[in-house]
């Protein structure tokens, strides 16, 4: 097992720019979820992908979008960055949609200035 | 709306001093309650899943319990390496694609 890897680990962007964050799921995992974690808070669910289709979405605007590829790697795209988008972005993968046994990556720390 | 609160917000213990963390939840049909540990700059690490009231799970110095409205994470004789943020999360039955609703966490510091 290689675990869940995310890249980059840190990123600084300017307000209004666009950003793409990447996630490589654990081997054999066909479900990936993305979370936003602001400093001092718990993670907030952005969306989930199952077999390349969006399978659930939290209260995030459409400028947050994603993709899951046939090899089950995933991307999170954020357009028109705002200062409040500064956070730790976490990717989690699983073999099912139910939630048991989710494995989280170490996250990407995004700072918007 | 599904909600999770955790208390206390922060807890400082001396090594060996046992205590409990609380997670209170409101959810429209509980599929599962999850406990995670998170170290600074890292992603959450899975600890336990509880599915029904009365269920208990143990792992080393940690024991998780579940009632219909809350869960407790009991820490017995903690060590400094237990210092971390402990997150509680619930998953509801209603939406099969819905994911976890996390609480804000309890920051635990265990002093030697």
Image (cartoon, coloured by chain):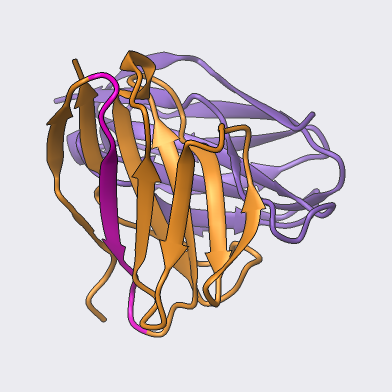
- Residue at the spot 41% in from the left edge and 82% down from the top edge: A70
Q: In which quarter of the image is residue A56?
A: bottom right
Residue B82 located within the stretch drawn in magenta: no
Position of B41 relative to A97 (above/below): above
Residue A16 located within the stretch drawn in magenta: yes
Indicate the quadrant containing the C terminus of chain A: top left, top right, bottom left or bottom right. top left
- Residue at the spot 52% in from the left edge and 73% down from the top edge: A52
Q: Where is residue B80 in the image (x, y as percent from the top left)?
A: 19, 33
- Residue at the spot 40% in from the left edge and 75% down from the top edge: A69
Q: Is residue B50 left or right of residue A15?
A: right
Position of A103 relative to A111 (above/below): below
Is any part of residue B44 visible from this angle? Answer: no
Indicate the quadrant containing the N terminus of chain A: top left, top right, bottom left or bottom right. bottom left
**Numbered circles on residues, count:** 0
Q: Where is residue B52 in the image (x, y as percent from the top left)?
A: 79, 54
Is any part of residue B107 visible from this angle? Answer: yes
Q: In which quarter of the image is residue A66?
A: bottom left
Chain A, hue in figure: orange
Q: Where is residue A84 in the image (x, y as percent from the top left)?
A: 37, 16
Position of A94 relative to B91 (above/below): below
- Residue at the spot 20% in from the left edge and 24% down from the top edge: A111
Q: In this view, does A3 lie to the left or right of A55?
A: left
Q: In this view, does B72 lie to the left or right of A110?
A: right
Q: Which chain is purple?
A: B
Span of residues in magenta: A15-27
Q: Position of residue A34 (x, y in %)?
A: 45, 49
Q: Which of A61 and A59 is in front in this view?
A: A61
Q: Quadrant of residue A38?
A: top left
Q: Is residue A103 left or right of residue B7?
A: left
């Amino acid at each position: 097992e290689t675990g869940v890897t995310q890249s980059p680990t840190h990123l600084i962007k300017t307000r209004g720019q666009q950003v793409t964050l990447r996630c490589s799921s654990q081997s054999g995992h066909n479900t990936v979820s993305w979370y936003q974690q602001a400093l001092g808070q718990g993670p907030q669910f952005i969306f989930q992908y199952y077999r390349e289709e969006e399978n659930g979405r939290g209260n995030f605007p459409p400028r947050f979008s994603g993709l899951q590829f046939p090899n089950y790697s995933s991307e999170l795209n954020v357009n028109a960055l705002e200062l409040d988008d500064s956070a730790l972005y976490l990717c989690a993968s699983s073999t099912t949609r139910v939630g048991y046994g989710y494995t989280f990556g170490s996250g990407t720390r995004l700072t918007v200035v | 709306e599904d909600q999770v609160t955790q208390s206390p917000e922060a807890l400082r213990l001396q090594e060996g001093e046992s205590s409990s963390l609380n997670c209170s939840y409101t959810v429209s049909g509980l599929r599962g309650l999850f406990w995670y540990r998170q170290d600074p700059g890292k992603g959450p690490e899975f600890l336990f899943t509880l599915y029904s009231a009365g269920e208990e799970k143990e792992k080393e110095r940690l024991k998780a319990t579940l009632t219909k409205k809350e869960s407790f994470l009991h820490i017995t004789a903690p060590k400094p390496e237990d210092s971390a943020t402990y997150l509680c999360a619930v998953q509801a039955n209603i939406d099969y694609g819905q994911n976890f609703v996390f609480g804000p966490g309890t920051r635990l510091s265990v002093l030697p």
